[in-house]
Structures are given as structure tokens and as C-alpha cells.
Image: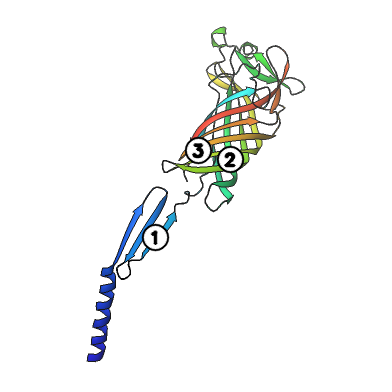
């Protein structure tokens, strides 16, 4: 028994001596961790470096967003000759996730699902209706308010608008890096869009009226997308690659309508 106790005491003293002769210094910087260990016996130095990787790659599109809308004559413009108000907007959600990325999270590809609700407001006392061929055209509001017995004072169509819903499936290519210890990302891609529930409304006589729910529009569309991610904030731009519908503008010309959206939102990763 005494022999075992003596052996244990010797081992504890040896361990304490080794610990006392070993000095470890750890330096942490933004880009890496450097650990230096010096052994007192032979003066040897061991340096271990661990380079920081990017954080998990961020979603390229906002979880919740609000965007400004416009109607264009083609992808990236120019603006169409349609009396659309600058107050036109869209709100929606994106739920995206990376499907593949590099080991350091610098490059990735993400996809997911989005849903949105768009409001295109019109001016010049015009409402959007459809002709005998279901083609959309602009009609003066007093054609409707006069028939329903409302006086001229109620003919201001400040709430004449087109509303519709969309489901979207985006595919985004991402480039991400760290800036001041915060993730920054540029992303570009395209998305499939399915539109539904498109209706034209106008407010007159103190209430909202459905002008048409049978417009001839393209339920399927494709868009191009670009986004800039700054930590949890996202700025994005979307433009249609295919036209949404044909509208006869105030000059009587048929115009192919492409939707454009410039938005801002937040990620809740």
C-alpha cells in the first residue's frame, strides 16, 4: 500500500513539473486563432493556427420584404405608358435555404419558396377593365360611378388598382465574404412565378368595387433576380423575363407589361 501511495505521489509531482514548464499563449484575431506552446525542457515552440471560416452562408432573399413596383415595356425597362402611381407596392415572404456550398461558405446555390401580394395603383381617373376579348384597357371612372348614381364629386379614382398574388420558386447563385466581421453577399439568379387571384378594383361612392376578375393575363412567368445582403438586411431587384399581360394604354396602343420590383427586407436566419 505504501508503495502505491509513493508511486502516485511521484506521478503527481512529475505532472506538476511538466505543467509548470509548459507555457501556452493564445492570440485571437478577426481572421484566425494562433496558439503558441513553449516547452521548458528543450525550449521547443509549437504554433497551431486555425483560420476562421465564413459564418453559415446567409439566405440570398429576405424572409419578409416590402418593395416598390413599376410596369415596364420589357425586361429592365423602359417604363411603359401606363398611368401607374409611384405608391404601387408589393409585400411578401421568401423561405430559402442553401442546397450546395463550398467548405468555406464563400460560394453557394440556394432555392426555396416565396409568396407575395402586389398592388398596382392607377392615376388619371382611370380604371382597368376588359373588352369583349378579355384584353385589359383603361376606362374613365365616371362610366361606372355615373351608372350607379354617384355624382361627379365621387369620380376621383385615387384607389383604382390591380391586385394579384404570386407563388415563386427562386434559384440563386451566391458569393459571400466577411467585412468588419459581418457577412456580405452578392447573389443573382432567376425564379419561376405563378400568379393567381388577379382583380381590378376602384373606390368610388365611399366603397370598393370589383371592376373585373376575368382579365386575360399570363399565370406563369419567369423573372431575373439580384440581391445584396448586409448581415440581416437585404436589398433586391426583380424584373420579368416574360410579360405578365397586354394592356391597351391611354393612347390606345397595346403594351406588353413586365413587372419590376425594387425592395428591402430582413432575414431571420
Mark 2–mark 3 distance (CA, rounded to whole Å): 17 Å
Which residue is located at x 41 percent, y 41 percent?
A: 180
Location of residue 185 with respect to 252 vertically, above or below = below
- Horizontal relation, residue 194 to residue 8: left or right: right
Residue 162's x, y, as percent?
Answer: 61, 24
Q: Nearer the viewer, residue 31 or 135?
A: 31
Q: Secondary structure at mark 3?
A: strand
Q: Secondary structure at mark 2?
A: strand
Q: Secondary structure at mark 1?
A: strand
- Horizontal relation, residue 40 to residue 247: left or right: left
Q: Quadrant of residue 69?
A: top right
Q: Which label sits in the foreground, 1 or 3? A: 1
Residue 203 numbered tag: none
Residue 254's x, y, as percent?
Answer: 73, 18
Q: Nearer the viewer, residue 41 or 174?
A: 41
Q: Which label sits in the foreground, 2 or 3? A: 3
Q: Residues within 10 Å of mark 1 (few under 14, many from 20)?
A: few
Q: Residues within 10 Å of mark 2 (few under 14, many from 20)?
A: many
Q: According to the image, label 3 marks what residue?
A: 229
Q: According to the image, label 2 marks what residue?
A: 114
Q: How many marks overall?
A: 3
- Horizontal relation, residue 116 to residue 21: left or right: right
Residue 47 numbered tag: 1
Amino acid at each position: 500500500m505504501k508503495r502505491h501511495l509513493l508511486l502516485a505521489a511521484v506521478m503527481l509531482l512529475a505532472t506538476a513539473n511538466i505543467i509548470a514548464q509548459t507555457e501556452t499563449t493564445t492570440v485571437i484575431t478577426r481572421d484566425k486563432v494562433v496558439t503558441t506552446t513553449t516547452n521548458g525542457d528543450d525550449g521547443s515552440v509549437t504554433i497551431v493556427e486555425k483560420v476562421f471560416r465564413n459564418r453559415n452562408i446567409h439566405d440570398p432573399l429576405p424572409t419578409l420584404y416590402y418593395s416598390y413596383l413599376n410596369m415596364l415595356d420589357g425586361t429592365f425597362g423602359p417604363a411603359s405608358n401606363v398611368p401607374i402611381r409611384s405608391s404601387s407596392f408589393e409585400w411578401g415572404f421568401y423561405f430559402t435555404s442553401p442546397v450546395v456550398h463550398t467548405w468555406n461558405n464563400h460560394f453557394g446555390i440556394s432555392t426555396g419558396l416565396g409568396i407575395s401580394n402586389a398592388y398596382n395603383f392607377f392615376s388619371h381617373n382611370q380604371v382597368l377593365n376588359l373588352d369583349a376579348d378579355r384584353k385589359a384597357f383603361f376606362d374613365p371612372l365616371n362610366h361606372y360611378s355615373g351608372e350607379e348614381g354617384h355624382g361627379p364629386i365621387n369620380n376621383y379614382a385615387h384607389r383604382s388598382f390591380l391586385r394579384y398574388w404570386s407563388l415563386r420558386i427562386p434559384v440563386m447563385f451566391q458569393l459571400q465574404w466577411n467585412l468588419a466581421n459581418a457577412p456580405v453577399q452578392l447573389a443573382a439568379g432567376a425564379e419561376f412565378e405563378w400568379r393567381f387571384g388577379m382583380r381590378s378594383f376602384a373606390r368610388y361612392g365611399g366603397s370598393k368595387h370589383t371592376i373585373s376578375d376575368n382579365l386575360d393575363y399570363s399565370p406563369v412567368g419567369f423573372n431575373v433576380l439580384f440581391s445584396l445582403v448586409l448581415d440581416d438586411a437585404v436589398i433586391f431587384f426583380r424584373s420579368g423575363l416574360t410579360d405578365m399581360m397586354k394592356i391597351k394604354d391611354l393612347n390606345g396602343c397595346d403594351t406588353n407589361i413586365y413587372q419590376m420590383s425594387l425592395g428591402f427586407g430582413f432575414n431571420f436566419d
